[in-house]
Amino acid sequence: SYDLTQPPSLSVSPGQTASITCSGDNLGHKSSSWYQQRPGQSPVLLIYRDGKRPSGIPERFSGSNSGNTATLTISGTQAMDEADYYCQAWDIDTAHVVFGGGTKLTVL
Amino acid sequence: EEQLVESGGGLVQPGGSLRLSCAASGFTFRSYWMSWVRQAPGKGLEWVANIKEDGNEKYYVDSVKGRFTISRDNAKNSLYLQMNSLRAEDTAVYYCARWGISSNCFGVWGRGTLVTVSS
């Protein structure tokens, strides 16, 4: 099965840049997506097709994907960005959807 | 407004069955693949199943294959998940989500329904 690996946690100071990585075999050849989940809420799509933002998502959220690693970058991190972040890809060989384990972002 | 509303969760004993429903509104339901995604308490997201627009293709995570069945009724704008032979490890919030086949992502999510498998 295809696996995606994320760091369990990341801390960042307000106003700084947070970079959350997601690693998988040849992930750069797949389309990656990112979701934000605040406590008690449903996930929200932040990034799709590696770097596209749905309407309504702030420009401070950006994404990239190359080699074995996809990266979600949050510029000028705000207190409201404190949440869990999940990467996701689609394995074309099995037609299965895969999520990373999630990264808890703390803004302090 | 595009909306998904799940129902049918609850407490069930190990080995029991439960049927989840998801009512869609605000978009052309029959034009989209649909999915179920679950989240065990305090854990991460886990994809459960996908179903094609016409219901003729279905895919499942290995851990539920043979026990869960995803289905849809396009006339009723509804998605279902029939869960049989439930185990304690199936305890989770189950989310209904819209799958973008060209964007390979979940663009719309419901609020989820909690399934607890316990004696």
Image (tube, coloured by chain):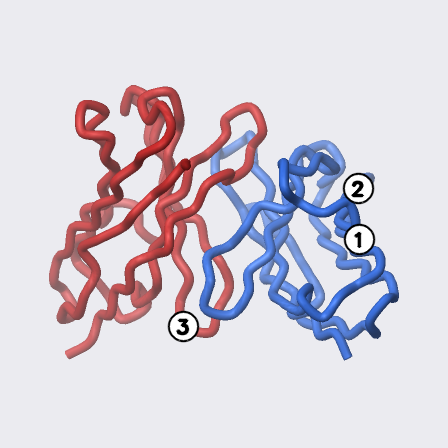
Report which residue position mark 1 lands on: A73
Q: Is residue A100 toward the left or the right of residue B52 in the image?
A: right
Where is residue B35 shown, x and y percent of the image? 38, 40
Quick check: B46 left or right of B65? right
Q: Colour of chain B?
A: red
Type of the residue with mark 2: Ser
Is disc 2 surrounded by few (<14), some (14 to 19) or many (20+) residues within 10 Å? some
> On the same chain: label 3 and label 2?
no
Task: Reply above or below: A95 against B9.
Answer: above
Q: Residues within 10 Å of mark 1 (few under 14, many from 20)?
A: some
Residue under numbered circle 2: A64
Whether residue B57 is visible, yes or no, is: yes
Give the chain letter at badge 2: A
Residue at point 62% right, 67% down?
A83
- The picture places residue B73, in percent across and down from the top left corner, at 19, 28
Locate residue A18, reporting x and y percent: 81, 62
Circle 3 residues within 10 Å: few <14, some 14–19, many ≥20? few
Q: Quadrant of the C terminus of chain A?
A: bottom right
